[in-house]
Amino acid sequence: MHHVPKTGGKSAADRNRLAGWSGLPACVDAVIATRREGDERALYIAKARDNSDGTGFAYRLKIVKVGEDDEGQAVFSGAIVPDGKPKQKVTLTKREDRALEAFTKAQAGNGQAEISYRRWKDTLFALADPGEKKGTTEQAFKDGHKGLIQKGIITQSGESFALASKGDC
């Protein structure tokens, strides 16, 4: 268990970093963070060595009786009760936006809900500016593809990709 700096910072990166030694995140396999905005609370995976970051759920605190003390007085604590997935605004990077555009075009051209990795990538390459270097387009696709999956906008099932249903987002 750890905390973010009390003073936070002006950027999101400063507000979400762990306090203390900068190498700490590299030493852990997973970071589960909590976020609170007004009455809404959420737990989410901020880092997972072998899994997708960003997955989480909304919760509410419920006061529950956990027993009695030596004098017979009730002892209470807070319990986390799942309340669906967090409601959060998703902002896309340029590369994610471009990959999403390619995905929807590939999907429309295919006439099916699911598309292959190859079809998605080929569509993005077809949308690239003629003067753009192939390596730049390749990296843009990798970054955009990965970001859309991590943000839960695109789901993967084996070798197929689909837009996440509204219940999944």
Image (cartoon, rainbow, N blue to C red):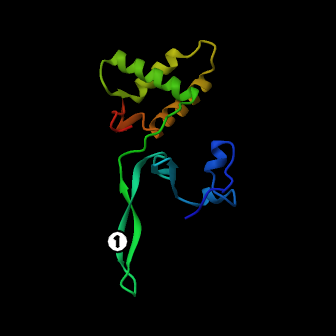
**Label 1 sits on what residue type?**
Lys
Report x, y in % for residue 31: 53, 56
Foreground: 107 or 73? 73
Q: Position of residue 118 (x, y in %)?
A: 42, 26
Determine whether 146 is above or below 54 in the image.
above
What residue is at 30 percent from the left and 22 percent from the top?
112
- Please identify the quarter of the rendering in which residue 74 is found: bottom left
Residue at 49 percent of width and 26 percent of height: 99
Q: Nearer the viewer, residue 139 or 20?
A: 20
Residue 14 visible somewhere in the drawing: yes
Using the image as rendered, state which of residue 19 and residue 99 is in the foreground: 19
Front position in the image: 48 or 110 = 48
Q: In which quarter of the image is residue 152?
A: top left
Q: Count the marks.
A: 1
Q: Quadrant of the C terminus?
A: top left
Q: Which residue is under mark 1?
A: 65
What's the residue at 41%, 29% (across, down)?
117
Residue farthest to the bottom, as pictured: 70
Residue closest to the far left: 112
Left or right: residue 92 versus residue 15 is left
Q: Residue 17: x, y in percent?
A: 63, 52
Q: How crowded is mark 1: few (under 14 residues within 10 Å), some or many (20 or more)?
A: few
Residue 122 in sight here: no
**Compared with residue 23, is residue 98 higher up or lower down, i.e. above or below?**
above
* Quadrant for the N terminus in the image: bottom right
Q: Where is residue 83 in the image (x, y as percent from the top left)?
A: 35, 49
Q: In this view, does 23 lie to the left or right of 124?
A: right
Q: Is mark 1 on a helix, strand or loop?
A: strand
